[in-house]
Each structure stands twice: as structure tokens, then as C-alpha cells.
Amino acid sequence: MTFDYEKLKSYAALPDDKLWAEIVSLAAARGIRLPGTVPSHADMERIRDVLCGKEKMHLSDAARLVNEYKKKYGGGNR
């Protein structure tokens, strides 16, 4: 899998609500429903750090966080 790092950086520059909308849209295109409620600003900053390569996150950690968020705010599996 390859990543367009410039695109990731452009996503990271978006305000919280627009970045979350992009994430929800990308997930939906892959059959994953996420809640529309924007995570806390601290969580959004962590997402930005991952997008910009400032923080590393294992896929299993990302999946766990998404599942916890879905349980808290809704958003079925597929």
C-alpha cells in the first residue's frame, strides 16, 4: 500500500470538523460506518500527528480506538 503524503498533510491542515468528515467519507467508501460526532480536539490532534508522521500507530491500535469510539457514539459495523 502506498500513501500520498502530500494529501495526508493537506488532510492534517483541515479544521477538526472537516478532517473528521473526510475520515468518515473515506471509511464509508470502504464499508465502515463511523459516527458523525467529531472526536475531542485532543483526539483529532493525535490523528493529525499520525497523518504527519509525528506519531506512529499500529493498525491494531487504530482499530481498537475506532471500535471504542463507535461504541461510545454509535455507528454500526457495515
Image (cartoon, helix red, strand yellow):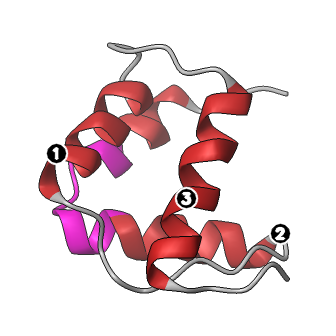
Name the spot of residue 53 as percent of width and height, x first: 41, 16
Q: Amino acid at mark 3?
A: Glu
**What's the CA distance linking mark 2 and mark 1?**
26 Å
- Where disc 3 sits, the SS reads helix
Query: Does residue 3 show up?
Result: no
Q: Is residue 14 left or right of residue 25?
A: left
Q: Residue at label 2? A: 30
Q: Going from the N terminus, do you reach mark 3 or mark 1 first?
A: 1
Which residue is at the front of the view, 25 or 38?
38
Up the image or down, 69 lies above or below 36; here it is above
Q: Is residue 31 left or right of residue 16?
A: right
- Give me the residue at 85% from left, 27% from top: 1
Query: Does residue 7 show up?
Result: yes
Q: Nearer the viewer, mark 3 or mark 1?
A: 3
Q: Amino acid at mark 2?
A: Arg
Please say whether residue 17 is one of the residues in the magenta stretch: yes
Q: Residue at label 3? A: 68
User: Could you say which quadrant of the image residue 21 lies in?
Assistant: bottom left
Q: Going from the N terminus, do you reach mark 2 or mark 3 first?
A: 2
- Where disc 2 sits, the SS reads loop
Q: Which mark is residue 42?
A: 1
Q: Going from the N terminus, do you reach mark 2 or mark 1 first?
A: 2
- Give me the residue at 68% from left, 45% from top: 63
Q: Amino acid at mark 1?
A: Ala
Name the spot of residue 42 as percent of width and height, x first: 16, 45
- The boundaries of the magenta stretch are 10-19
Please say whether residue 59 is one of the residues in the magenta stretch: no
Q: Is residue 68 left or right of residue 20?
A: right
Marks 2 and 1: CB-CB under 8 Å?
no
Name the spot of residue 75 as percent of width and height, x first: 62, 85
Which residue is at the front of the view, 38 or 26?
38
Q: Nearer the viewer, mark 2 or mark 3?
A: 3
